[in-house]
Amino acid sequence: MIEWLDIYKVIEAMMPLYLALGLGYGSVKWWHKLSAEHCDAINRLNYFFVLPFFTFDFISQVNPYKMNYPFICGDLIAKAIIGFFLTLWANFYSKGNFSWSITTFSFCSLTNALVMGIPVMNAMSPQVGVDLVIQSLAIQFLIWSIIIQFMMELKNAKDEIMTCEGANQDLEGNDNNNASKNTTPSLGSVMTIVWTKLSKNPNFYACFLGIMWSLVADRWHFVLPNIVKECISIMSKAGSGIGMFTIGVFVAMQQKIMAGGTGVIVFGLFLRFFIGPATMTIGSFVVGLHGNVLRASILQAALPPGIASFVLAKEYGVHPEIVSAV
């Protein structure tokens, strides 16, 4: 049973985030200190410099030898179900498209596990729930965040090639509309751009180094020197605050808070609080989870979207107005 003290702990954990969001909102709406260019710069700082440190810091502290692998398999099954239906929707439905598939998968995959998940789970299922939330966040960084970034790079690479080829054909005297319709980027050229971009992305190296260090450190009981831990920590702790501040700045720049419309927002909430838990329930039953582990696995899938969802959406320009509102 959740008591008032448990509710207070959740509010206590979330209040600093909403303070940062309010400061970001006020800096544009009331005090007129920041512009759209500032918002882009702050988010890029978070994406390329703060998030990698946070990713390494978090993953390196998770013991891979003590993870609940049936839970992880259930999570993989849940996301596979979502991915399967999104693939069908994007390829065979007249209104389906790749960018909305990415946003939908992001809604269903990246949760606010660290800030909100741990206090909530600590109130409902102290040991099992908190452990699963931590493992869930590690999997988000190691698997789902990487997949989402890959898909976003893939989308942008296709758009970039089609734009360039369409512009070249237009300069040669062809009709631009027909050129755009007839332009189909080759898979090789698209993947070359994608892998080039990803090879320069520090978030991928942070994931790899984090899990490698975790495997070695927990196997042979190594610890990072304190000077290294403090250097990582000072950047890692800035991520949530900067992310929420950027959301506040971005929301203040929109003509209305619910920029995508009420219908789209409701659909996003439906994905997060119904589809996510429903597919996790299926995955959990398939692998045989039960008791507190089953309840905790379903509850962690119903957590609100994570700050990383907006950071990625804003960096790649894939529906950040929708993600910021949900």
Image: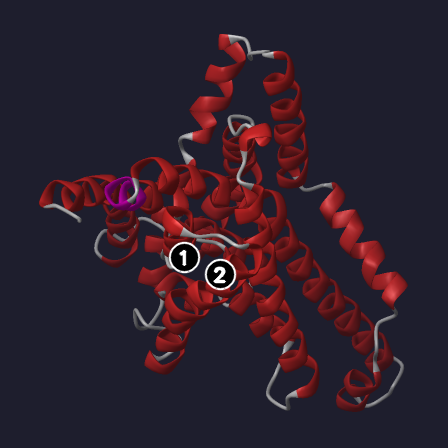
How far apart marks 2 and 1 lie (CA) works out to 6 Å
Could you say whether the residue bearing mark 2 is in a helix, strand or loop? Answer: helix
Q: Position of residue 191 (x, y in %)?
A: 82, 58
Is 292 magenta? The answer is no
Q: Nearer the viewer, residue 206 or 58?
A: 58
Q: Position of residue 187 (x, y in %)?
A: 86, 66
> Identity of the amino acid at label 1?
Ile
> Identity of the amino acid at label 2?
Met
The residue carrying mark 1 is: 298
Q: Which mark is residue 280?
A: 2
Q: Nearer the viewer, residue 240 or 13?
A: 13
Q: How crowded is the residue under tag 1: few (<14 C-alpha within 10 Å), some, or many (20+)?
A: many
Q: How crowded is the residue under tag 2: few (<14 C-alpha within 10 Å), some, or many (20+)?
A: many
Residue drawn 29% across and 49% down? Answer: 21
Q: Earlier along the polypeptide chain: callout 2 or callout 1?
A: 2
Q: Nearer the viewer, residue 257 or 8?
A: 8
What residue range appears in magenta?
119-124
Magenta-drawn stretch, dominant element (helix, strand or loop): helix
Q: Position of residue 8 (x, y in %)?
A: 14, 42
Could you say whether the residue bearing mark 1 is in a helix, strand or loop? Answer: helix
284 vs 114, left or right, is: right
- Contact check, label 2 and label 1, Cβ < 8 Å: yes
Q: Position of residue 280 (x, y in %)?
A: 49, 61
Q: Is residue 261 visible?
A: yes
